[in-house]
Image (cartoon, rainbow, N blue to C red):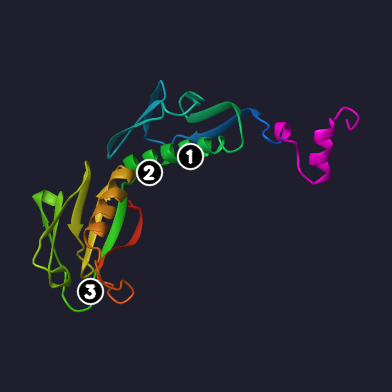
Amino acid sequence: FWLKATSSDLTWRLHGFLPPHLAAMKTLVQEETIKVPKGIKISIKSKIVEVEGKHGKLTRDFKHLPIELYLASSGHEVRAKMYFAKSKQLSMLRSVCSHISNLFDGVQKKFEYKMRLVYAHFPINATITNGGKTVEIRNFLGEKRVRTINMLEGVKVEKSTGTKDEIIITGTDIDCTSRSAALVRQSCLVKDKDIRKFLDGVYVSSHGTLED
C-alpha cells in the first residue's frame, strides 16, 4: 500500500491527514427507515408525501432532495435511500425522516405553542378575533398602536383558561404553528431601549404535541 502511494500522498500522511481524494470518500448506499403509526394513511408519489389522520391531511414535497423515497413492508414503513453521497450530504436522510415524523405527530396529536405575555408596568392586552385566526395586541409599553397578527393556514390561537396572561397556538403543521408563534413574538420587540432592562414582550414558554 505504501509503495503504491505517491510522494504527495506520503506528505499528507506524515502530517496526520488523509489525501483529499481519500478524505472525501463517498458512501455507496445509505438507508434510513421510519415506521408508520397505526391509524395513519400515507402515500408517496414522486417524492411528494401525503399523510392523513384524525386531525386532517398534510402534504410535503421533497423533490429538491437527491434521495429515493418509497413505502416498504406493505405500507408500514417509509424508507429513504441515498446513493454515492458524501458524509455531509447523508445528513439530509435523517432530516427527511424527522420531517415525516412531524407530519405523523401533526395529524395524530396536533402541535401546541404556549406563549406568555410579559410586562413590568404597562399590562399587555391580547384580544382573539376572527374565530381564533387573528390576535390583536394592545398597550405594549403603553403604545397606542394595535398590533394585528394573522395566524397562518390551519393554525388557531386561544386564551389560556387556567393561566393568566397566556395564549395558546395550536395546529397540525409544525412549520405553520411555529411560524405563527414567531410572528407574535416578533410583533412585540423593544426598539431603541436596553433589552436587558426592558423585558416586555410575548415569549414562547413551552411547546410540543397535545396529549390525547
Numbered range of the magenta stretch: 1-22
Q: CA distance from mark 1 to mark 3?
A: 38 Å
Q: Amino acid at mark 1?
A: Ser
Q: Nearer the viewer, residue 76 or 1?
A: 1
Residue at the image point whose x is 65% and y is 30% from the top: 27
Label 1 neighbour load within 10 Å: few <14, some 14-19, many 20+: few
SS state under label 3: loop
Q: From this view, report whether residue 86 is shown above or below residue 176.
A: above
Residue at the image point whose x is 26% and y is 72% from the top: 193
SS state under label 1: helix
Q: Nearer the viewer, residue 162 or 199?
A: 199
Instruction: Point out residue 71 in the picture as x, y percentages from the top left corner.
Output: 47, 25
Instruction: Point out residue 19 in the picture as x, y percentages from the top left corner.
Output: 75, 36
Label 2 neighbour load within 10 Å: few <14, some 14-19, many 20+: many
Instruction: Point out residue 60 in the picture as x, y percentages from the top left corner.
Output: 35, 32
Instruction: Point out residue 81 in the picture as x, y percentages from the top left corner.
Output: 55, 27
Q: Nearer the viewer, residue 173 or 145?
A: 145
Q: Residue furthest right?
A: 3
Residue 8 falls within the magenta-colored stretch: yes
Q: Nearer the viewer, mark 2 or mark 1?
A: 1
Q: Which residue is mark 1?
A: 95
Q: Amino acid at mark 2?
A: Asp
The number of numbered discs placed on residues in the rendered structure image is: 3
Residue 124 falls within the magenta-colored stretch: no
Q: From this view, report whether residue 143 is shown above or below residue 70.
A: below
Mark 1 vs 3, N-terminal side: 1
Q: Amino acid at mark 3?
A: Tyr
Q: Which residue is mark 3?
A: 119
SS state under label 2: helix
Q: Which residue is mark 2?
A: 105
